[in-house]
């Protein structure tokens, strides 16, 4: 009996480890390629271990493409998006959770329905709207449309429902807090874990977004990191070492952020899906 | 009659006034939720309606729009490239979804085993693929499946197999695209299944065991039925995501969708028509076709999963 459970435990870990290797290997391979010369990568047999060319490959990246500008653009868009999303979504989510007003249910259900509309249906006209209001090539075009999004409001409302006690709000009201005060001084501190998740979720989404920035930004000075990366791959695809070093550089910051917040982030994703 | 009208006019304004005063009283609430609705009107609803309008007009982005009625939808139905992209999209969906959700279920069951060590580390390492940008994933997979010097071809060469043109072969390239989807989303779906499994109350299993049910019976009569909503969720999300597949083929194969357009998906086709060919009207018709396909196909999948 003891032997049998030992075997089944071993088998479980074996299967999981195979999965982990498949998950992690592409990152390893990316790092290996970034540290080798192109001829070492394309050689048969290829070099399967780390080399010492990372610095030279990175220098080529910076010499050929404005990587820093792309990174700066992404960072500006991501940070403003996160701050704005947290504010507008938590304000609306809190209001939906804790205040009764005529039409509340209708408004909330219609908000949920908009989540099911595939974004690509409005894609072309959204671009035309941006062109008409002169927002093509602007940061706003990447920030504003997502600021108060249905998922974020839904998420905060769900969390608020269960965690912000009505008695506390009542006490605040007696102390003369107006509705914004109740939100800012009472709800926000309690909502912090939900805000942390929504913030990371938004950051990762904006950081990785590709199709919309590809369409709405034509000026290389405003390219986001993912567009820069795709350009790097498209134009210089003969210099593997360089393309891979650029890809590594673009990928690492997000992976670090993910590892730091992974617990909160993963349980947030799981809750969001299961509680629906 | 007159009297009834009279009472009506007496009652209605009072009711109306109280509704309006109720709305006025809650004006701050409306203000706080308004940003979403304002943004949705400008960047959601208006574009959707405009897209419908455009679908009935021929427009290259410059100059006058010309009303053409259903002509663009008729053209679409006879356009071989459109149907080719529909076929490609469904093929990639089919190749990726079934193995992905199967692997995800297996991983979730294993991660849910009691007393499993390193559960948190496993979760993180399975999920990390999902936070990696698709552009980066496409670049890495491009090198792994390179036609000549790719890693996969190298390993095949160790067994005496000649290099396979993964990216040029119309069937194999779909497997490459599907493998990217599977790699990026298996961990994500596993985490969702795991949460679903953990939300099943342990007491149900205990009660069933006391009643003499074996593990197979509890699996088919407790686990699967209670997991059904979660499976439904993942199937629908996967369907919606797969039908909109764009970045993988665009970065891996370019705007053309590769040799013979074998990797041309519906979204890439729409993108090409709009932003390369400047056929904004026709591309809008394509986007409505995409919308209808997503709606119908999600519905079919929903019915299919519910039958189990």
Image (cartoon, coloured by chain):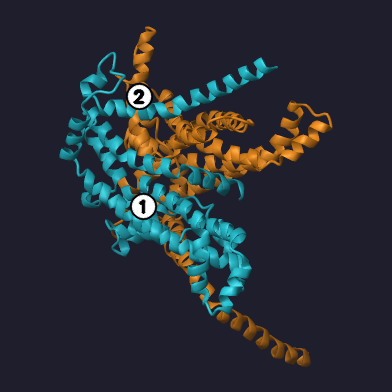
Residue B211 on image: x %, y %: 84, 32
- What residue is at 28 percent from the left and 17 percent from the top? A46
Q: Nearer the viewer, residue A239 or B260?
A: A239
Q: Colour of chain B?
A: orange
Residue A145 on image: x %, y %: 40, 59
Disc on the earlier residue, 1 or 2:
2
- Say whether marks 1 and 2 touch (CB < 8 Å): no
Counting every numbered tag in the picture gives: 2
- Residue at the front extreme of this rendering: A2
Instruction: Please state which of the two labelled residues, at mark 1 or mark 2, is closer to the viewer.
Output: 2
Q: Is residue B90 visible?
A: no
Q: Nearer the viewer, residue B160 or B270?
A: B160
Label the cyan chain with its letter. Answer: A
Q: Which chain's residue wears label 1?
A: B
Relative to A225, is B198 on the left or the right? Answer: right
Q: Which residue is mark 1?
A: B280
Task: Decide: is B217 above or below B82.
Answer: above
Q: Nearer the viewer, residue B76 or A219?
A: A219
The CA span between labels 1 and 2 is 36 Å
Residue B95 on image: x %, y %: 51, 28
Task: Decide: is A89 above or below B155.
Answer: below
Residue A177 on image: x %, y %: 52, 77
Q: Secondary structure at mark 1?
A: helix
Q: Which residue is mark 2?
A: B144
Q: Which chain's residue wears label 2?
A: B
Q: Which mark is residue B156?
A: none
Q: Is residue B273 visible?
A: yes
Q: Quadrant of the C terminus of chain B?
A: top right
Relative to B238, is B133 on the left or the right? Answer: left
Mark 1 closeness class: few <14, some 14–19, many ≥20 residues within 10 Å: many
- Quarter location, residue A128: bottom left
- What residue is at 39 percent from the left and 38 percent from the top? B132
């Amino acid at each position: 009996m003891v032997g049998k459970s030992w075997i089944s435990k071993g088998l479980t870990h074996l299967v999981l480890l195979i999965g982990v290797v498949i998950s992690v290997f592409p990152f390893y391979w990316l790092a290996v390629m970034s540290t080798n010369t192109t001829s070492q990568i394309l050689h048969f047999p290829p070099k399967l271990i780390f080399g010492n060319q990372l610095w030279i490959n990175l220098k080529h990246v910076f010499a050929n493409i404005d990587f820093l500008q792309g990174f700066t653009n992404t960072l500006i868009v991501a940070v403003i998006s996160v701050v704005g999303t947290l504010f507008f979504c938590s304000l609306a989510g809190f209001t939906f959770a804790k205040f009764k007003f005529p039409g509340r249910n209708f408004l909330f259900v219609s908000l949920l329905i908009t989540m099911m509309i595939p974004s690509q249906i409005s894609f072309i006209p959204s671009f035309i709207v941006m062109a008409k209001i002169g927002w093509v090539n602007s940061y706003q075009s990447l920030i504003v449309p997502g600021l108060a999004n249905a998922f974020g409001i839904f998420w905060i409302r769900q969390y608020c429902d269960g965690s912000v006690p009505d008695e506390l709000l009542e006490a605040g009201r007696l102390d003369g807090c107006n509705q914004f005060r109740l939100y800012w001084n009472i709800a926000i501190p309690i909502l912090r874990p939900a805000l942390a998740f929504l913030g990371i979720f938004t950051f990762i989404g904006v950081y990785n977004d590709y199709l919309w920035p590809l369409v709405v930004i034509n000026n290389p000075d405003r390219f986001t990191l993912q567009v820069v990366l795709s350009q790097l791959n498209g134009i210089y695809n003969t210099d593997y070492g360089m393309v891979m070093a650029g890809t590594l550089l673009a990928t690492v910051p997000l992976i670090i952020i993910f590892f730091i917040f992974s617990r909160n982030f993963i349980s947030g994703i799981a809750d969001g899906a299961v509680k629906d | 009659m007159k009297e009834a009208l009279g009472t009506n006019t007496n009652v209605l304004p009072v009711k109306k006034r109280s509704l309006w005063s109720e709305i006025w009283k809650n004006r701050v609430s409306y203000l706080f939720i308004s940003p979403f609705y304002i943004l949705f009107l400008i960047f959601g609803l208006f574009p959707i309606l405009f897209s419908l309008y455009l679908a009935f007009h021929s427009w290259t982005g410059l100059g006058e729009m010309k009303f053409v009625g259903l002509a663009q939808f008729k053209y679409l139905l006879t356009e071989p490239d459109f149907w080719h992209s529909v076929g490609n999209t469904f093929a990639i969906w089919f190749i990726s979804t079934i193995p992905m959700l199967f692997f995800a279920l297996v991983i979730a069951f294993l991660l849910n085993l009691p007393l499993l060590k390193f559960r948190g580390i496993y979760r993180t390492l399975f999920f990390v693929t999902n936070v990696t940008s698709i552009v980066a994933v496409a670049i890495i997979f491009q090198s792994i499946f390179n036609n000549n010097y790719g890693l996969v071809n190298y390993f095949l060469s160790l067994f005496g197999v000649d290099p396979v043109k993964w990216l040029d072969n119309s069937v194999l390239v779909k497997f490459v695209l599907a493998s990217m989807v599977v790699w990026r989303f298996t961990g994500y779906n596993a985490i969702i299944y795991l949460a679903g499994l953990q939300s099943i109350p342990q007491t149900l299993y205990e009660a069933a065991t006391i009643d003499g049910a074996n593990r197979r019976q509890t699996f088919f009569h407790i686990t699967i039925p209670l997991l059904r909503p979660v499976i439904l969720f993942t199937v629908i999300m996967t369907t919606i995501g797969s039908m909109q597949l764009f970045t993988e083929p665009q970065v891996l194969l370019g705007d053309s969708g590769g040799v013979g357009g074998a990797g041309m998906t519906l979204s890439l086709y729409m993108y090409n028509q709009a932003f390369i060919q400047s056929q904004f009207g026709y591309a809008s018709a394509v986007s409505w076709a995409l919308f209808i396909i997503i709606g119908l196909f999600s519905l079919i999948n929903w019915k299919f999963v519910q039958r189990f």
